[in-house]
Amino acid sequence: MKNIISFTIIICLLVIVKSCNTKDKKSIKPEQSILSSDSLLEYRYQQILQQPLDSLGIPRSFDITTNTLKKLSSSDWTSGFFSGSLWQIYQLTGNEEFKQKAKDWTAFMEKEKNNSGTHDIGFMIFSSYGKAWQITGNKNYASTVVQTAKTLTSRFNKNVKAIRSWDWNQDVWEFPVIIDNMMNLELLFEATKISNDSIFHNIAEQHANTTLKNHFRNDNSTYHVIIYDTIQGNAINKVTHQGINDESDWARGQAWAIYGYTMAYRYVKNPAYIKQAETTLQFYLSHPNLPEDGIPFWDFDDPKIPNAPKDVSAAAIIASACYELFSYTQKEKYRVYADHVIKTLNSENYLLPRQNQSPFILGHSTGNKPKNDEIDVPINYADYYFLEALVRQKNLNKNK
């Protein structure tokens, strides 16, 4: 298909583009976006800033066709990303208004620190309180991270050597572990750094090792869900919940794996982690169904490609991971791909237009395609990882 090319060709094109002095009229350079008050990205920042405070109305996504904002309470797995985005806009701009709004929205999340009914408290609290701790150094934020880590460890099974993901569907799934769960380990690793209690780090490392052993196929792509028995701790089934089928390559699942093992390497320095991140990334980048602009379709195996919806959130997660992966490996191809994705997203093709007054930055994400839920829409976690990638890009550019 004309719009599908290999990653090798992408790299070649990027080198050519980089050497040119001509401007892409639709592209907005990241540094211009941050500094210029009339840029489209700056306008999107303002839409986030102006969202009225509401503990039961945290923005999750926006249905463009019906002009409807999907709002949620702190108990939703995506609830921490909105405040986390505000913290990161503050990092990028230095504007104190964003810092104050970040504080206000973050406070809504605190009660989830004792929520033992979900593994997603890692997402919920680390994207909000974790970012706040990393940016401000405020010990009150750190104490919430540690308490949440204590709660999360209650879901760890010593026989499986992993943290349970979902509690529903127990008559079919005895002990499910999803690849997304790798992302929750950052909270545990950081809790050990804060408290000096090694239990959090040890549990996170065991979970990462169990996932490393069972979640990956021979081609280094990842399954979405592994079902374990709790007596022997064996993997007894490998399925999907959000991919097109059990053996398909769900794009965001690959993103969670790449990011998760890159992050885990930061804390453990296990070479097997960095190897898995690289090999899964290579699978992703060399896939014949990866579009030229670097933004994947929601599932690489959707037979409707190229007429299938894309998933900007997967691209943003991987771009952020690639910057960190570059810092460990110094392999320029990772940085080149991340820069390519950021340039693509930071354009009129993906930034929401001015007439869209929702509190989001990017369009064209896919939440849960099998359930026909949040298809081709702005989603808060896409914005969060895009902003994180911008922060990482900015920091790397400082060190050039």
Image (cartoon, helix red, strand yellow):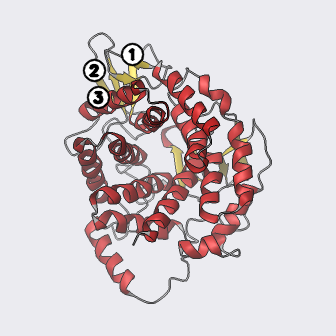
Q: Toward the viewer: 46 or 3?
A: 46
Tell me which label, 3 or 1, sits earlier in the chain. Answer: 1
Label 1 near label 2: C-beta < 8 Å?
yes
Q: Which residue is mark 3?
A: 210
Q: Which residue is mark 2?
A: 236
Label 2 near label 3: C-beta < 8 Å?
no
x and y, in percent, of residue 207 in the image: 34, 28
Q: Is residue 57 above or below residue 379?
A: above
- Secondary element under disc 1, as helix, strand or loop, is loop
Q: Is residue 233 above or below residue 253?
A: above
Q: Toward the viewer: 82 or 326?
A: 326
x and y, in percent, of residue 269 in the image: 28, 43
CA gap, disc 2 and disc 1: 9 Å
Tell me what residue is drawn at x 39 percent, y 27 percent.
Answer: 198
Query: Could you say which quadrant of the image residue 215 lies in?
Result: top left
Q: Residue furthest bottom?
A: 21
Question: Is residue 57 rendered to the left or right of residue 15?
Answer: right
Question: Is residue 272 rendered to the left or right of residue 161?
Answer: left
Neighbourhood count class around disc 3 (C-alpha, 10 Å): few under 14, some 14–19, many 20 upward: some
Query: Could you say which quadrant of the image residue 340 lies in?
Result: bottom left
Please, what is the three-letter code of the amino acid marked with disc 2?
A: Ile
Label 1 near label 3: C-beta < 8 Å?
no
Q: Which residue is mark 1?
A: 174
- Secondary element under disc 3, as helix, strand or loop, is helix
Tell me which label, 3 or 2, sits earlier in the chain. Answer: 3
Tell me what residue is drawn at x 47 percent, y 56 percent.
Answer: 316
- Secondary element under disc 2, as helix, strand or loop, is strand
Please, what is the three-letter code of the amino acid marked with disc 3?
A: Thr
Q: Is residue 150 above or below residue 10?
A: above
CA gap, disc 3 and disc 1: 16 Å
